[in-house]
Amino acid sequence: MFTRWTFYDICNAQETNLFGGWFDTLTPMERARVHAMLDLLKHKEVLGPPQARKWKGGGECEGLRYLRVSAPDRMEIRVFYECLPNWKMVLLCGAQKKSNRLVPEGACQTAKELKKLLSTPGHSKIIEHER
């Protein structure tokens, strides 16, 4: 099957993998669920609900794009991303949704900062997401 999307992690100018730092804190089962979501999306031409959404309703997350990943124990994971030309999805950071709030606190602000870093030439780098 034809793969449309390629997934990338965002790194800072010093090549520290910023998404990978968060991803490594997940349990093996949670990481597997995120990868299952990426496998599902890589063939889609259009990203949309229920897997991919744009945050609406105000607050600090307003306007951010995120993947909605179900995880064990009825907990959900949010992976914030940005799309680039040529079917590239840059994974910015993530959070766990617990009791209608995101953990870690400030995940949306981090995603916005990384999105800005991504758009500033010379301040970031992307590397292909590893499994």
Image (cartoon, rainbow, N blue to C red):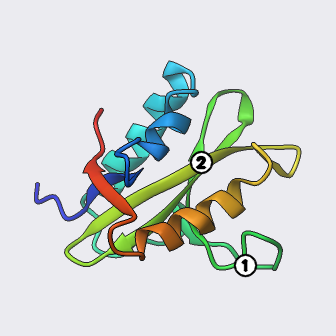
Which residue: 34% across, 74% down? 121
> Which class describes the residues within 10 Å of circle 1: few (<14), some (14-19), or many (20+)?
few
Percent x, y of residue 1: 11, 54
Judge left or right: residue 40 versus residue 112: left
**Residue 6's spot in the image, x, y percent?**
24, 57
In the image, residue 10 sits, relative to residue 26, either above or below, namely: below
Give x and y (percent) for residue 87. 24, 70
- Which of labels 1 and 2 is toward the front? 2
**Which of the numbered marks, if any, corresponds to residue 56?**
1
Measured in 3D between alpha carbons, the distance from the residue under mark 1 to the one under mark 2, in whole angstroms, is 17 Å
Q: Amino acid at mark 1?
A: Lys
Amino acid type at image mark 2? Gly
Q: How many marks?
A: 2
Identified at 28% across, 36% down, the residue is: 130
Would you identify the image quadrant in which residue 111 lies? Answer: bottom right
**Which type of secondary structure does the marked residue at label 2 adopt?**
strand
Q: Which residue is mark 2?
A: 94
The 10 Å Cα crowd at callout 2, few under 14, some 14 to 19, many 20 or more, is many
112 left or right of 34? right
Mark 1 or mark 2: whose residue is earlier in sequence:
1
Q: As drawn, is 45 to the left or to the right of 81?
A: left
User: Which quadrant holds the C terminus?
Assistant: top left
Q: Circle 1 — which element? A: loop
Residue lying farthest to the top in this orientation? 28
